[in-house]
Amino acid sequence: MSDEDLPGILSFLERFPDEDSCWEHLRDARWPDGFTCPMCGEDEDWIFLDERQRWHCYACGHQPSITSQTILENTNLDLQTWFLAASLVFTTKQGFSSHELARKLEVHQETAWYVQQRLGPHRRPLRPALVRARRTR
Ligand SMILES: [Zn+2]
């Protein structure tokens, strides 16, 4: 897996034009073979609550969100901004200062710094998701 596998800006925008496409991608990347409840292992008796981006498991009542147990959990930042940040950070060998990243993402410098901290030690889980995005085109 090389850096060339990651999408450029144009193919990124084609693949992730809005929030919905990002949610859909993350959902498919995390549960490619369909949902299985992380609490009880139930894989049939559930529904997906679209408006809340969560599953509801009828077997145990657990409601895991698409982002639960990921670096995207409990953030107010758009998923598209996270995806773009990951794409930029992972395709740039020399990296960005938080000020540069803030300008590119059009967010405050503090937010960019926070995003960098979260992405830093977690390159691997997001990287395969972005690579897979490229290949499904
Ligand atoms: Zn369950």
Image: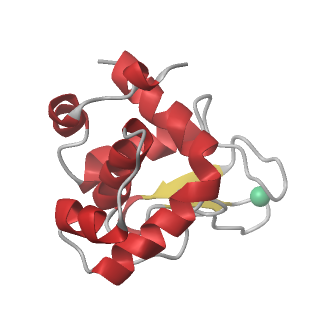
Residue drawn at 57 percent across, 30 percent down: 32
Q: Quadrant of the N terminus?
A: top right
Determine if residue 47 is in view. yes
Residue 37 in percent (x, y) is at 73, 52
64 vs 133: above or below: below
Name, please, the residue furthest toward the right.
Answer: 40
Between 113 and 35, the residue placed more toward the observer is 113
Between 99 and 56, the residue placed more toward the observer is 99
Q: Quadrant of ligand 1?
A: bottom right
| Quarter of the image where one finds residue 105 | bottom left
Residue drawn at 44 percent across, 62 percent down: 53
Q: Quadrant of the C terminus?
A: top left
48 vs 103: above or below: above
| Quarter of the image where one finds residue 51 | bottom left
Horizontal side of residue 19 vs 128, given as left or right: left
Name, please, the residue furthest toward the front.
Answer: 94
96 vs 114: above or below: above
Residue drawn at 24 percent across, 36 percent down: 12
Residue 44 in percent (x, y) is at 69, 41
Residue 2 in percent (x, y) is at 50, 20
Horizontal side of residue 14 vs 59, given as left or right: left
Determine if residue 72 is in view. no
Residue drawn at 24 percent across, 31 percent down: 8
**Color encoding of the figure:** secondary structure
Residue 38 in percent (x, y) is at 77, 54
Between 25 and 110, the residue placed more toward the observer is 110
Between 80 and 95, the residue placed more toward the observer is 95
Tally the numbered discs. Answer: 0
